[in-house]
Image (cartoon, rainbow, N blue to C red):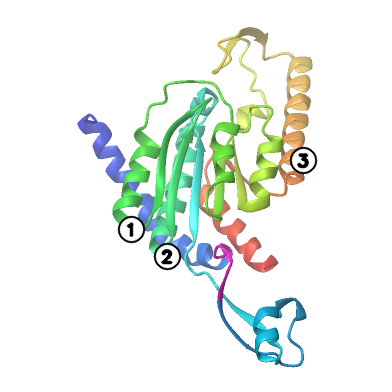
Amino acid sequence: MLPEPLLRQLRRLMLKTRRAARERLAGHYEAAVRGAGLTFADVRPYQPGDDIRRLDWNVTARTGVPHVKRFVEERERIVYLCLDISGSLQFGSQSQTKRTIAAEVAALLAFAAAARRDRVGLTLFSDQVELRLTPRKGDRHAHRIVRELFAFAPQSRGTVMETALTPLRLARRGVVFLISDFRASGWDRALRVAARKHDVVAVCVTDPVEMTLPAMGRVRLADAETGQVLVINTSSAKVQQAYSMAAQSRRDSTLSRLRAAGVDVLEVSTSGGHLEALIRFFRARERRR
């Protein structure tokens, strides 16, 4: 049982994200997220202009008249939310941590999908799968997902992204939102394999301090996942320049690897504006399609 202050905070977050998802996001989500594919409906006689690749050779041979297969789009979609809850997501130099922003983005997507009667599943992962919820429809299931997004406490602090991506090989085709800061290695191949089957969107969560080091004198820094400690002089111009160059190089490398895997990329920040970033992202996808 959650403490009462946390329950009240969770209820406020649920109300806020549900209202935002239904009033501002759902329409853009509907237009930008396609169904799972095409389902065979029936056959009909061939007409000039039909794609010959859709010829049904069995029916054509049986009747002596060319027939083509007719397909309809599957309207029901399956949305897989894969959320990184490793130690590095606990960082935040603003009013919220990267974990909170990641959870709010996933909550917006869960409520938008529920409003359109799509099935939504959830995987929370660190260096292991911490929680997996099977895709289902309905507001009750969406509320369960959002509760876990904000309240679940991970057992591990490391990151192994393949633990969340590998099971997708056997999952029914759908839309995957992989939400992480991507501060891990070795995920490229698993992501490429997942993208061959699913429509994958990588949501990269960042914090301003990860790009620009503020001048605060000597600071003791600890890696959130390994515990390694480093003391640096943040007021040194040389240190700040080296830090910014390394940060930009890391960002460019991450985005390049994501795009090479064949996925769409959305960046959100702890500085805010993630709802607007989602709307802009969906609008861009809609225009492309």
Q: Is residue 8 left or right of residue 247?
A: left
* Residue name at image x 49 percent, y 26 percent: 90
Which quadrant of the figure has residue 18? bottom left
Q: Is residue 287 above or below residue 238?
A: below
Comparing 111 with 131, the one in front is 131
Nearest to N terminus: mark 2 or mark 1: 2
- Say few, some or many: other residues with alpha carbon within 10 Å of mark 3 (under 14 / 14 to 19 / 20 or more): few
Nearest to N terminus: mark 2 or mark 3: 2
Nearest to N terminus: mark 1 or mark 3: 1
Q: Is residue 264 left or right of residue 16?
A: right
Query: Tag 2, which secondary structure?
Result: loop
Q: Is residue 270 above or below residue 112?
A: above
Q: Which mark is residue 116?
A: 2
Q: Please, what is the three-letter code of the amino acid marked with disc 3?
A: Ser
Question: Residue 52, percent across and down?
Answer: 76, 81
Q: Is residue 144 above or below residue 114?
A: above
Q: Please, what is the three-letter code of the amino acid marked with disc 2?
A: Arg
- Magenta stretch in the rendered image: 32-40
Query: Tag 1, which secondary structure?
Result: loop
Q: Nearer the viewer, mark 1 or mark 3?
A: 1
**How far apart, in angstroms, are the residues tagged by discs 1 and 3?**
37 Å
Question: Residue 32, percent across and down?
Answer: 58, 64
Question: Disc 3 marks which residue?
Answer: 256
User: The N terminus is located in which quarter?
Assistant: top left
Question: Disc 1 marks which residue?
Answer: 138
